[in-house]
Amino acid sequence: MKFVQDISPRIRTFLLAAVAMSVPAGETGFQIGAWGEVFYSRPMGAWAIVTSLFLALLLVPRKKLPVPVTYLLVLMVPSVWILLKMFMFEYTQGQVLYPLLFGLGVASYVICLPFAAYLIIQIINPDLLDLRGWRPKLSLAAILLAMFLVGFVLGRVNYLFVECEDFVLAGDEPPANCRPAQVD
């Protein structure tokens, strides 16, 4: 495959980022489309990864690794989500904080997790993620948004290609609009 040898490092980076970050974007969109929410396992996984990076960055002396405060604030989002969720369950009745919690849960998985992965890769091998200029970044954002939206639509119309039994076999609660299994 000669064409693969001729790909520039920037194009390789773009392709890697587009594929790697499209999975969480598409899956999250599907969950929101099918069930109207994001399952706890996705933001919890994001919380564990992002918070471990946050804590590690706090423990490294700032002289050795001067991480901008804005980066640390982004890495705090999943922990804020968890704390607000605990507060909501303990002290509020109903949906008072639900829109904020929903947004923070989605952000934890779709924004904070890829950002943490980006930071980890930048720290380990800065040349790997060389996306200079706005065009590749906007293109990447457009791909991720498209994957999220397509996932959302597929979640909404899951009955066209997935049966209720498929959700059960995967260990998920079938969404209200799933298609019952075909009986032969």
Image: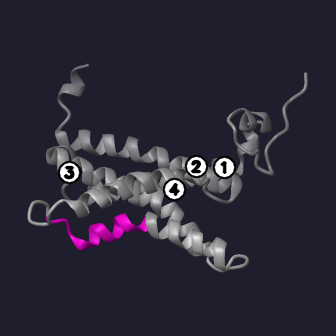
Mark 3 vs mark 1: in front: 3
Task: Reply yes or no: does residue 69 show up in magenta.
Answer: yes
Which residue was labeled with disc 2? 151
Which residue was labeled with disc 1? 155
Height in image: 46 above or below 72?
above
Mark 2 vs mark 4: in front: 4
Kindly state the secondary structure of the residue where label 1 is placed.
helix
Which residue was labeled with disc 3? 122
* Numbered circles on residues, count: 4
Horizontally, is 53 left or right of 151 in the view? left
Q: Which residues are magenta?
A: 66-77
Which is nearer the eye, 38 or 60? Answer: 60
Task: Calculate the distance from the C-alpha at mark 2 to the C-alpha at mark 3.
Answer: 29 Å
Query: Could one spot residue 147 in this view of the protein?
Result: no
Mark 4 vs mark 1: in front: 4
Residue type, label 4: Pro
Query: Does the magenta stretch mainly form a helix, a strand or a loop?
Result: helix
